[in-house]
């Protein structure tokens, strides 16, 4: 039977030849191209093929219980040691908020900031404080942890770089890119009322603790000796030599000339300690200590260290003392209080009980959990034997 082809199935010979020629040309060009290894398979190594030897821990109940008991015993022992060490520190705190009530009332009116007010706070030290003795100021109810307060500073300014361009507003700058965001956060303590840049700017620097405290020892009824105190060695090394630096100038007064002091400061930045150039300007240690904000509303900060010379080589002897205070820092306006603290240190630091209590509670809970696991294990083991 003859085969009949439809006209729709007739091949166009010319078109077919063109397609074949094009395919042949493509194949020829591909053969001429350099050959690359396109494989994505990783190398045949133990690491890349994930065939490294592995060990799956199969801990028995006795091993787990031993780990729990050892951890609990270690934490409990460490907690007891830390608590005993913290208890061995000697500390005395003198709250002078109400003792200096006249000065506190005077400072409630900000217009009296330039009026000097002093008071004397006598106290008795019952026991000798041996070794290094540290003086702190302690504030109650002062919230340094407020978010806007923490941001109100210029780290670029405090490091001593471009203190002028960092302080001026954008309208006064030719290159506005140098006015960084941290300087904007200083407002409203960025410029004085007459438009002069405030150095250092910000609410933290403006609210610096500025009481002056000296300690006197009553050697007898007629002789008072001022206890020698050190103003340096109060800060972290990184703060003193990295985060806070003075501008490169031979004279700080000329470097800061044309600037304004913060509104609540009695002296400009270059007169914080004119007797010691290494403790003046941005690297003044009282300023650095204050600029490290506290996490809680009740805090104490290091103010002075005992200089162990003359009558105080071994520490502070027992006897009658008095704090002579130039009262400048107001606290009654926000229902706060302030104290002076004298304290010794141990190998773990001060007399705080938090770390010791944390170790003790953790150790006790771990031991309780260990005994509970042991009881459950023995009960299940006995049930298994009775079942068999």
Image (cartoon, helix red, strand yellow):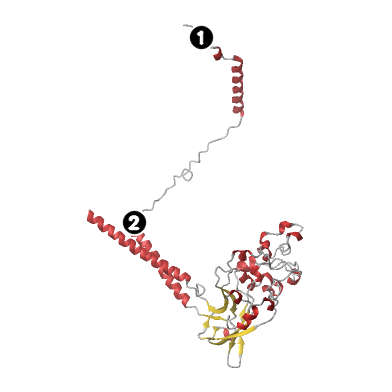
Horizontal and vertical percent position of residue 370: 35, 63
Residue in the picture at 36% in, 63% down: 369
Residue that carries the numbered disc 1 in the rendered image: 4
The dot on residue 60 is: 2
Of residue 110 and residue 220, the one placed in the foreground of this image is 110
Horizontal and vertical percent position of residue 136: 57, 77
Of residue 271 and residue 297, the one placed in the foreground of this image is 297
Tag 1's secondary structure? Answer: loop
Q: Earlier in the sequence, mark 1 or mark 2?
A: 1
Horizontal and vertical percent position of residue 57: 38, 53
Horizontal and vertical percent position of residue 357: 44, 70
The dot on residue 249 is: none
Residue in the picture at 68% in, 79% down: 112
Can residue 25 be spotted in the picture?
yes
Of residue 149 and residue 249, the one placed in the foreground of this image is 149
Residue in the picture at 61% in, 89% down: 224
Tag 2's secondary structure? Answer: loop
Left or right of 173: which side holds 309? left
In this picture, is 328 found above or below 293? Answer: below
Left or right of 181: which side holds 133? left
**Residue at far top of view:** 1
Of residue 194 and residue 234, the one placed in the foreground of this image is 194
Residue in the picture at 57% in, 34% down: 36
- Viewer-side label of 1, 2: 1
Q: How many marks?
A: 2
Asked if marks 1 and 2 touch (Cβ < 8 Å), the reply is: no
Can residue 326 be spotted in the picture?
no
How many angstroms separate mark 1 from mark 2 (CA)? 85 Å
């Amino acid at each position: 039977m003859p085969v009949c082809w439809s006209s729709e199935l007739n091949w166009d010979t010319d078109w077919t030849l063109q397609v074949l020629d094009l395919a042949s040309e493509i194949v020829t060009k591909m053969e001429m191209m350099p050959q690359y290894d396109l494989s994505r398979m990783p190398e045949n190594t133990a690491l890349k093929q994930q065939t490294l030897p592995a060990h799956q821990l199969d801990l028995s109940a006795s091993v787990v219980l031993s780990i729990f008991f050892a951890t609990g015993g270690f934490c409990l022992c460490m907690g007891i040691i830390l608590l005993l060490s913290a208890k061995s520190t000697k500390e005395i705190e003198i709250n002078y908020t109400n003792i200096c009530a006249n000065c506190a009332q005077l400072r409630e009116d900000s217009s009296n900031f330039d009026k000097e007010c002093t008071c004397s706070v006598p106290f008795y030290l019952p026991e000798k404080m041996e070794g290094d003795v540290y003086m702190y100021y302690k504030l109650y109810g002062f919230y340094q942890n407020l978010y806007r307060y923490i941001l109100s500073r210029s780290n670029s300014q405090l490091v001593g770089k471009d203190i002028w361009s960092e302080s001026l507003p954008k309208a006064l700058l030719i290159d506005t890119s140098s006015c960084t965001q941290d300087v904007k956060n200083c407002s409203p303590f960025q410029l004085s009322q007459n438009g002069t840049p405030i150095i250092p700017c910000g609410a933290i620097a403006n609210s610096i603790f500025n009481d002056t405290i000296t300690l006197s020892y009553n050697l007898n009824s007629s002789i008072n000796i001022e206890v020698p105190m050190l103003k340096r060695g109060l800060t972290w090394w990184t703060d003193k030599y990295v985060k806070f630096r003075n501008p490169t100038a031979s004279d700080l007064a000329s470097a800061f000339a044309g600037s304004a002091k913060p509104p609540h400061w009695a002296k400009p930045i270059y007169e914080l300690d004119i007797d010691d150039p290494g403790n003046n300007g941005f690297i003044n240690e009282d300023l650095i200590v204050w600029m490290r904000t506290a996490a809680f509303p009740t805090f104490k900060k290091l103010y002075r260290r005992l200089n162990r010379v003359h009558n105080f080589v071994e520490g502070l002897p027992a006897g009658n003392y008095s704090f002579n205070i130039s009262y400048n820092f107001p606290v009654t306006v926000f229902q706060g209080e302030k104290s002076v603290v004298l304290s010794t240190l141990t190998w773990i630091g001060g007399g705080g009980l938090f770390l010791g209590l944390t170790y003790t509670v953790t150790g006790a809970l771990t031991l309780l959990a260990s005994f509970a696991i042991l009881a459950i294990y023995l009960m299940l083991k006995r049930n298994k034997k009775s079942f068999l």
